Structures are given as C-alpha cells and as structure tokens.
Image: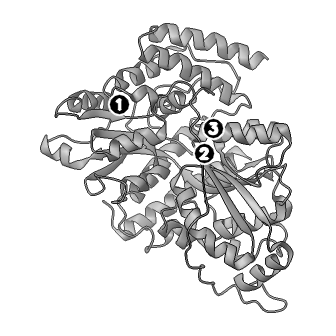
Amino acid sequence: MYGKSSKSVLVFFCLVLMASLIAACGGSSSGKPAPSESNSGGSAAPQESDNGSGTENGPLSLEDWGKKIAEKHKGTEIKLAFASHPSTDAFQKMTKSFEELTGIKVRWEVMEQTYLKNKQLMDITAKTGTYDVLMVDNFWNDEYISKNVATPLNSYLDDSSLTPEWFDYDDIVPAYRNMFAKQDGTVYGIPTAGETRFIAYRKDLFEKYDKQPPKTMDEYLELAKFFNGKEDGLYGVAMRAQRGIHFASGLMSIMYNFSDGILDQKTGEITMDDPSMVQALQFYVDLLQNAPPDVASYTHEEAVSAFMSGKVAMWLDATAIAPWILDPKKSKVYDKVGFMPTPEGPAGRASALAGWTMAISEQSKNKDAAWAFIVYMNSKLSSKEYIQHGGVLVRTSQFEDPELAGDDVMYPVVLEALKDANALMERGVSWVPPHEKLGQMLDRVGYYGSMALSNEMTVADAAEKAQKELEDIVKE
C-alpha cells in the first residue's frame, strides 16, 4: 500500500491525466420491488469555511444563504427519486440539518435503479411533476437529454445568490463534471458519486491457500474456478447477472479488456458479433459459472451482499459501492478484504468511468428549492461530512484531504483504476457508449447474454441475435 506522500503524487498524476483527457476529447427487464420512503435522520450542519464571510458585499455565508432560502421556500416540500446507494445513505443522514437551515421539507423515495429510471420517465411522460430532485445514472444521459427529463443548470450555477462561493463547482474532479454531467457546454446534473470498477477479494482466503490476486483475466477465471466449492458454501465470484440491463452492466466490467465494445464509437456500427466481443461474452458466461447458483437474479445489490456475507472469494463492481464492504454494520468480511484494479485482458487495461448525478426534474414545480437541496448536499463546504457518512469521492479536495483519504485501503486502488479508465479513453473509447438508445441496446445484450448463461443458447448464437436486434434499434 502507498504512503501518504506517494498517494499525493498519484492523486495529482491521475487528476492531470483526466483533465488533459477532457481537453483532448471536448465536451428494461428486471423485477420491481416496492420503493421505500423515509424521512432521514439528522446530523450536524457543516462548518463554514473562511470564504463564507457573510459581509454585505462579500460572499454569502452558509447562515445567510440559509436565511435567504428560508424567506422564499420555508414550508415547501420537495420529493426525491433516488437509488439505493451509499451516496443516498449519506445524503439522508445530512437531510435534517438542511431542513433546519432552510425550512424546506424533504421527502425521500428510494428504490432499485431500474425501477427508479422507469418511475422518473413515467413522471416526465405523464407531466405530473411528482419529483423535484432526480438521481441520474450517467448511462441514461443521452436518453434523458433527448427526452427533456432534466433542467439545464447553467443559470443556477452562474447566479451567486443561488450558488454561493462555498459550493465551488470547479473543485469537482474534471472528468466527472465534464464526462457525465455536461453535454455541449450545458450542465444537466451535479456529480454525486463518481466511480470506476475494481476487484475486492478475501485476503484471508488468498493467504490460507497461498494465492495471489489476479493480474490477468485468465488468472481471474482460474482463481474463480479454484475457490468455487473449495470450502462448504464458498463460491468464486459475485457479479451482476440479472437478465437485461444488469447482465449487460456486469459484462461491461470486463468487456473492454477484450474488445472495444458493442459498437464502433466512431462509425456507429454495431460490433456485437465481432470475434473479440464474442470472446468477452464467453469469458463472462464462463466466469459466472463460478458464482452462487442464484446469480442470474443479481443486480449490484445482490452481488455485493453475497460478497459481504462471506460466501464469495472475489467481487468485481463499482468503487462507489465498496464502502458497504468495509462497514462492520453491513459486512461480515469488512476486516478481511483487499482491493485491486480490473485485471488486464487481451485488449489491454481498461476500467469504468461512470457515476451518478443530482438533477432537477424538468416537471418540478419547486425548481429553486430543489436547487437549494443540491447546493447544500454537494457543496465543498459539506463534502467532508458527506464522506464521513459513507459518501463517494467526487471532489479534488476530497482526494487530497489526508483526513479523508488517509490510510484508507481503497483510495490508492481507486486511483489506479482511474488510470486504467483513462487508458481506455486514450484508445478513443468511452466506457459508456454514446447513444440515446443505449438503454434499449444494453437491455437486449443482457437478455441474450443471460440466455447463454442459462444454456438456452450458445454464446455465439446470443451474440448473433443481439447483433441483429441492435442493428434494428439504431435504425429506428
């Protein structure tokens, strides 16, 4: 593990790489569990920084900003549509202090992410204005922009009375704020949980059987086979594999280490039946043969739960979820875990650059109150409290804060994984394919991939059928 000085160098190097990349590049089928609604518990308000002077002509202090918001919006209720996620947990813990400061009442609706998207789109289509603040996966961006789901935020960001200096938009990691929160200069969301993907593994099991973490995809599969059934109730891996979008998302965790993905991002040509893509799908199906028998029902929640229960040797998924693994209240293996970047494959090193944003629904009747919530929760002033409650790093200052990054076992590996994400983009490939019908495309990839997993067809047939359907989708 890295020392603090080495970590600082790595942080700087990684951020420079991402910033330079931005300059170079410019600018469903799952079940529907019932949503859970709750009014969150409380936490102390964030401490003000020196720039919140509150003078008549100077920057607005947190207290003065809160008074101005309360004068206009006290008693207003805003409703939120969010996914079950560590960042959501953190924001809920911070909500009481926001309500006390502004007089705005917050009502949470938290649900599984596929159901979340459906609810958000239904609200927009019906023009009911049920929700004010939306949690948006960057997979949905092109579709949401084309359907006018989210309100452009530039005017809010430019208004110092609505967005005080202590919000500090420029402190958000450049790759996050530019790659999945903005399009053609228009900001549609504020990053709340930037992520890449990496492996968590059971250090105790690896030490017990004298095994080393995998450096290549071949080694990853070999280790999954080795641990699968090695002990009573033990399985090799846990990953997303629920039929449809979740299977496709899990496939994407390893796909770019074999190929350039399901479409040529320069020409728009569908490449699902390319030999390298078929190889990636075959590898994923083979890997999942070493997962728990109910893996075909796994979203990200079931996959991480299986790993946290202690019955799985390895897990590959989003870094934003990893705080759950290290939480002794949630995880039986919190003190037995190591992390490492996604192993190298035939196409080289690659990893995800993805995440979530907070957006204002275009149908919201309380847009200014919704923006006040977004400002408070995502400001630099609140960022330390957010991380301490289990939130996910998205700001440069968070990575550089030794009190936050400190000796955390995850952060050096997160930064290594972000370097792999940068390597993928240097290949000219965006981890999230830029297409407004991406959701439909991934749903069909995941449908046929899961059929191959259940032996309803061969991998080659699954790739061929997906190829034809994807070609039809992009022609529509």
Front-most of residues 310 and 314: 310
Residue that mark 3 sits on: 115
The residue that appears at 41% across and 54% down in the rendered structure is 324
- Estimate the spatial distance between the alpha carbons at disc 3 and disc 1, rounded to whole Å: 32 Å
- Estimate the spatial distance between the alpha carbons at disc 2 and disc 3, rounded to whole Å: 8 Å
The residue that appears at 69% across and 44% down in the rendered structure is 25
Res 113 → quadrant = top right
| Position in image of residue 136 (x %, y %) | 67, 47
Q: Is residue 447 left or right of residue 199?
A: right
In this rendering, the label closer to the viewer, 2 or 3 = 2
For the question of whether residue 10 can be seen, the reply is: yes
Compare marks 1 and 2 and give the one earlier in the sequence: 2
**Crowd band around label 3 with a 10 angstrom C-alpha radius: few (<14), some (14–19), many (20+):** some
Residues at badges 2 and 3 in contact (C-beta under 8 Å)?
Answer: yes
Question: Looking at numbered disc 3 in the image, what kind of residue is underneath it?
Answer: Tyr
**Crowd band around label 1 with a 10 angstrom C-alpha radius: few (<14), some (14–19), many (20+):** some
Front-most of residues 374 and 422: 374
Residue that mark 2 sits on: 35
Secondary structure of the residue carrying numbered label 3: helix
In this rendering, the label closer to the viewer, 3 or 1 = 3
Compare marks 2 and 3 and give the one earlier in the sequence: 2
Res 368 → quadrant = bottom right
Compare marks 3 and 1 and give the one earlier in the sequence: 3
The residue that appears at 39% across and 44% down in the rendered structure is 305
In the rendered structure, find residue 217 and report the number of the disc placed on it: 1
- Estimate the spatial distance between the alpha carbons at disc 1 and disc 2, rounded to whole Å: 37 Å
